[in-house]
Amino acid sequence: MAEHPIRFGIIGCATIATKVARAINLAPNSLLYAVGSRSIDKAKSFAAVNGLSDTVKLYGSYDQVLDDPCVDVVYLPLPTSLHVHWAVLAARKKKHLLLEKPTALDLTELDRILEACESNGVQFMDGSMWLHHPRTVKMKEMLFDSGLLGQVHLIHSTATSMGMTEFFENNIRVKADLDALGALGDLGWYCIGATLWSKNYKLPTSVTALPDTLKNSDGVILSCTASLHYYDDDDQPIKKSTTAIIHCSFLSYTCTDLSISASKGSLHLKDFIIPFQEDSAFFNYTLDAKLVELHIGWNIVKPEKVVVDCELPQEALMVQELARIVEGIKKSGCRPDSKWPEISRKTQLVMDAIKQCVDLGCKPVYLTENRTHYN
Ligand SMILES: *[C@@H]1O[C@H](CO)[C@@H](O)[C@H](O)[C@H]1NC(C)=O
């Protein structure tokens, strides 16, 4: 543990808070300092169930966490509809912010949060853990730095997880007043994030929802598929373009595939959001694959496998990275890092466009830096 670790306060004792509390304890530069719930009993039971140290402050309200001058960073895993209120308040109290995804119900709300962070000089980061895994860094090198795989043409990502009957009736992820974006917000966030990541955060030109969107009786999306289109505007005789297909659903068993097809090869993984194992992860790629003469097989026997070790789980790396930035702001007067809010903002912008397209009956929606529109 560092001599002066960055102190985290958690507001809300959602299931995901258990995982992040563990991550804060694992990250060497961070300390779980306070937990606040709507009642002190809930906070106490969260502390007991998770075996938290006696030194962790327990509060019976969210406000007490925000008012504690020792809290540096607030982790906010509340239902999405409550994000804008509590995140803006936290930023005004000069708390750096780790905000669970989806970050807000729409871009207008997220912009209010980002504006509050900016004007109060605090760091913003959303809870997308996979971006912090060393495997993600390794794949990025292969796609962009070495250019080994060539030009990306197709990105296919899936994020599904099966809901039980009880889930469809009671879980906050399918309640219109709590998490109105449903599967698109909870799981589609990752697919949109993977698409933007694969294109080095270039925004698509347009998005189109496929006509297969399924909603519950509250109008909350349970399953949806969309295509995202990139058109390169250079003057080449054959226009380069990229298409991404994303699929998110609460109706299929867990599947988190990402495959990228590019001009010289392809990249595949089946566990892009949470690796199969914590301490080591792998991805596969093929390079210059061809069929042999007579087309009775391939010139490669199987894909190349790249194994990447991970000393800390990806969520602890996320906490560590945020604490590192916060330390720079606190101790060396650094500016907040604009990379993380920019990634969140683009993800939310594309999500808004897909939602708008669903609502318009699958009419394509075009994107610009600041908004979405249709013709
Ligand atoms: C990845 O590659 C390894 C080695 O070539 C192979 O055994 C494995 O089945 C591949 N896995 C996937 C998910 O493609």
Image (cartoon, rainbow, N blue to C red):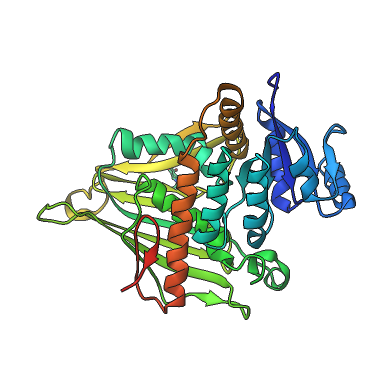
- Rendered-image quadrant of the N terminus: top right
**Residue 365 can be seen in this image:** yes
Q: Is residue 348 left or right of residue 44?
A: left
Relative height, residue 364 to residue 288 (above, below): below
| 316, 6: nearer the viewer | 6
Residue 339, picture quadrant: top left
- Where does the image place residue 41, in percent across and percent down from the top left? 90, 51
Relative height, residue 113 to residue 106 (above, below): above
Q: Is residue 160 left or right of residue 245?
A: right
Residue furthest toward the left? 237
Residue furthest toward the right? 41
Q: Residue at x 34, y 58 (%)?
A: 368
Q: Is residue 125 left or right of residue 74?
A: left
Q: Residue at x 75, y 51 (%)?
A: 12
- Rendered-image quadrant of the C terminus: bottom left
Query: In which quadrant of this rendering is ligand 1 seen?
Result: top left
Q: Residue at x 47, y 52 (%)?
A: 345
| 307, 112: nearer the viewer | 112
Residue 239, picture quadrant: bottom left
- Where does the image place residue 32, in percent across and percent down from the top left? 75, 35
- Where does the image place residue 95, in percent across and percent down from the top left? 66, 40
Tell how many labels.
0
Relative height, residue 360 to residue 56 (above, below): below
Q: Is residue 46 left or right of residue 274?
A: right
- Where does the image place residue 131, in percent across and percent down from the top left? 50, 42
